[in-house]
Image (tube, rainbow, N blue to C red):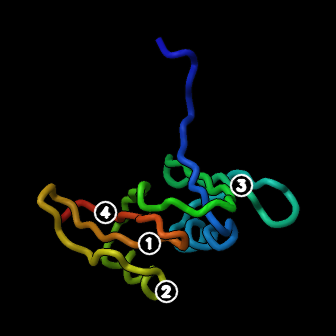
């Protein structure tokens, strides 16, 4: 039996927490759950969306985004990517139906992390 481990969530190391917060909170709809420090420019922010959790942590080291990707489900992949493109987000892969029955697009967050957005093909 595990030793009481619980509540895991990924922390993305980002160069600019406020810039990344605009992407995740304002464009993708994550809710802010915790900010540190409480005053001044945030260095750590925890976020939640529909049961999923994510945190953003400031780093001065080079960001290693190639090894990490996020997946989000959306009601309408084409509308989601149009919204993000209009906001200046770089589209990595245009929406396309996949053989496993989902429509998927991919975008890059401000630090280059890939965010896949999918929905069941109807």
- Using the rendered view, name the quadrant where residue 73 is placed: bottom left
Residue indicated by mark 4: 118
In the image, residue 47 sits, relative to residue 41, either above or below, namely: above
Residue at 50% across, 46% down: 51
The residue where tag 3 is placed is 44
Query: Which badge, 4 or 2, comes first in the chain's sequence?
Result: 2
- Quadrant showing the C terminus: bottom left
Q: Secondary structure at mark 3?
A: strand
Q: Are marks 4 and 1 in contact (CB under 8 Å)?
A: no
Name the N-terminal-most of marks 3 and 4. 3
Give the mark, 1 or 2, whose residue is nearer the N terminus. 2
Q: CA distance from mark 3 to mark 2?
A: 24 Å
Query: Secondary structure beneath disc 2?
Result: loop
| Residue named by callout 2 | 88
Find residue 108 and name its label: 1
The CA distance from mark 3 to mark 1 is 20 Å
Q: x, y (%) of residue 117?
A: 35, 65
């Amino acid at each position: 039996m595990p030793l009481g481990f619980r509540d895991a969530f990924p922390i993305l190391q980002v160069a600019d927490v406020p810039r990344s917060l605009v992407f995740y909170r304002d464009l993708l709809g994550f809710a802010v759950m915790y900010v540190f420090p409480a005053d001044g420019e945030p260095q750590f922010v925890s976020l939640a969306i529909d049961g999923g959790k994510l945190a953003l942590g400031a780093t001065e080291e080079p960001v290693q985004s190639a090894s990490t990707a996020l997946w989000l489900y959306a009601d309408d992949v084409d509308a989601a990517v149009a919204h993000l493109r209009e906001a200046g987000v770089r589209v990595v892969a245009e929406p396309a139906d996949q053989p496993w029955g989902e429509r998927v697009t991919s975008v890059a967050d401000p630090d280059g992390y890939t965010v896949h957005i999918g929905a069941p093909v109807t």
